Amino acid sequence: NVQGDRSVGIMHFVNKALNERIEKHLGFVPPFKEGYDTVGAMKAMHDGKAKVFVCLGGNFLMAASDTEYTAKGIQHCDLSVQISTKLNRTHLVTGKTALVLPTYGRSEKDMKGGKIRHITIENSMGQVRQSRGLLKPASDTIKSEPELIAELAHTFFNGKHTMDWKSMGANYALIREKIDLVVKGFQDTEQRSKGAGYYLPNNVRELDFSKLPNGKAQLTINKVPKHNLNSNEYMLMTIRSHDQFNTTIYGMDDRYRGVYNERRVLFMNPEDMKAALLEKLAVVDIISTYDGIVRRAHKFRVIPYAIPEGDLAAYFPETNVLVPHNHFADKSKTPISKSIKVTLKKV
C-alpha cells in the first residue's frame, strides 16, 4: 500500500541518507533532484516538462482532482503507459501513444518455472509479510509488475548496469535482499516475512519519543479556518461509500448511510433543504467556481442527512470534477476535497 511504498523509498522527494545507501550497496547514483507529487505532475504535463507517464496501477484520471484538467494533462504526454490489473477509465484518456500492460492482481497465482512466487507487503500496522495469489490468472501471457519493470530496465540499459534487472524480475528474493541492504528496519526479510511476518520499527508503538524535543510527543493547536460562505454557498466534502475502496467501486450500496443502488447522491441537512425549497430526491447540479473557472457536477439526488447546516457530502470520484487543481494544502499539497465551496442549481 502507500505506506509500504514510502518505506522502501517510492516518493517524489529526495532522502539523502537513502540515496547514499543505494549508491553504496547497489552501485549507481540515484536521482538527486526532487520529482513531482500528483499536483506537480499534472502541472508538469501541461507545461510540457513531463512527456512520458507510467502508471504502476491505479486509476489516475479519476483519483486526481479537477478531472477535466487532469485529462488534458495526460493528453499532452507523448506516451502514457498503464500497468493494470483491470480496465479503468484512465485507459480511455491517453497520451499521443498509449500502452496498456496487463499484470497480475494480488489474488492471482504468480507462477515462474512451475513454482508459485510470492511478494512481500507492508500493511497499515507496519507489518511485513508474504502474499500469494490463489486464483488462475486471466491469461497465460500476463507478466508480473516487478517483471515488467525489471525487463524495461534491462532493455533500457541493454543489460549493462550494476543491477542484474532480469534476474530480479524472475526471482523476487533478490529484490528483498536489496531492500534489506538499503532500507532501514528491513532485515532478513526473506525468512522473517513467513507466517505472521514481522513489524518494522515504530517509535510511537514502542513509546520511544527520545528523538523529539524534550523527549515528548508534539501536539499543536490549529485554528479552524474561516470560509466566509455567501448565503447561497455550501461547503462540500467528498467521501467514500461502504462498497468502495479508493476509486474501485465494488457495489452501488452504502448501507451505513442507508443508500442503495445509487451513487450520484448529495447528503444535505434537512433545514438547508427546506430553506432551498428542495424535496427529498430532488435533482440538482453542484457548481464550484474558483479563479473564474466554473466547474459543474451534473444530476445528483438530494438526500436528507444528519450533517451540519451549511455542509454537504457526496461521493468521490464523481465529484472530483469540482475540485480545482491549484487549491491545496500548503505542506502536503492535498487538494481541497474536504472543503469545496459550491452552489446548487435545481434541474
Image (spheres, rainbow, N blue to C red):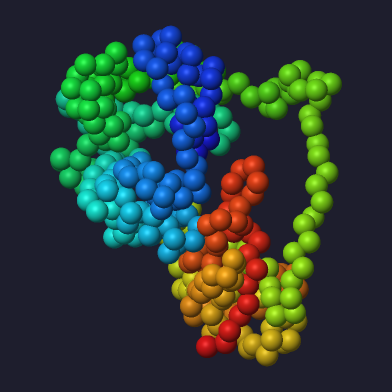
Report the residue at 31% width, 23% height from top. Answer: 172
Report the residue at 61% width, 80% height from top. Answer: 344
In the displayed structure image, the side of residue 107 where residue 68 appears, left or right? right
Question: Along the line of sight, which residue is nearer the eye, 335 or 315?
Answer: 335
Residue 158 seen anywhere in this rendered image of the structure: yes
Looking at the picture, how far across and down is residue 246, in whole percent?
48, 53
In the displayed structure image, the side of residue 109 where residue 328 appears, left or right? right
Looking at the picture, how far across and down is residue 145, in whole percent?
30, 36
Report the residue at 29% width, 16% height from top. Answer: 163
| Vertical comparison of 61 with 129: above or below | below
Q: Residue furthest top?
A: 24
Q: Quadrant of residue 270?
A: bottom right
Question: Along the line of sight, which residue is nearer the eye, 100 or 173?
Answer: 100
Q: Quadrant of residue 293?
A: bottom right
Residue 4 seen anywhere in this rendered image of the structure: no
Question: Along the line of sight, which residue is nearer the eye, 38 or 302?
Answer: 38
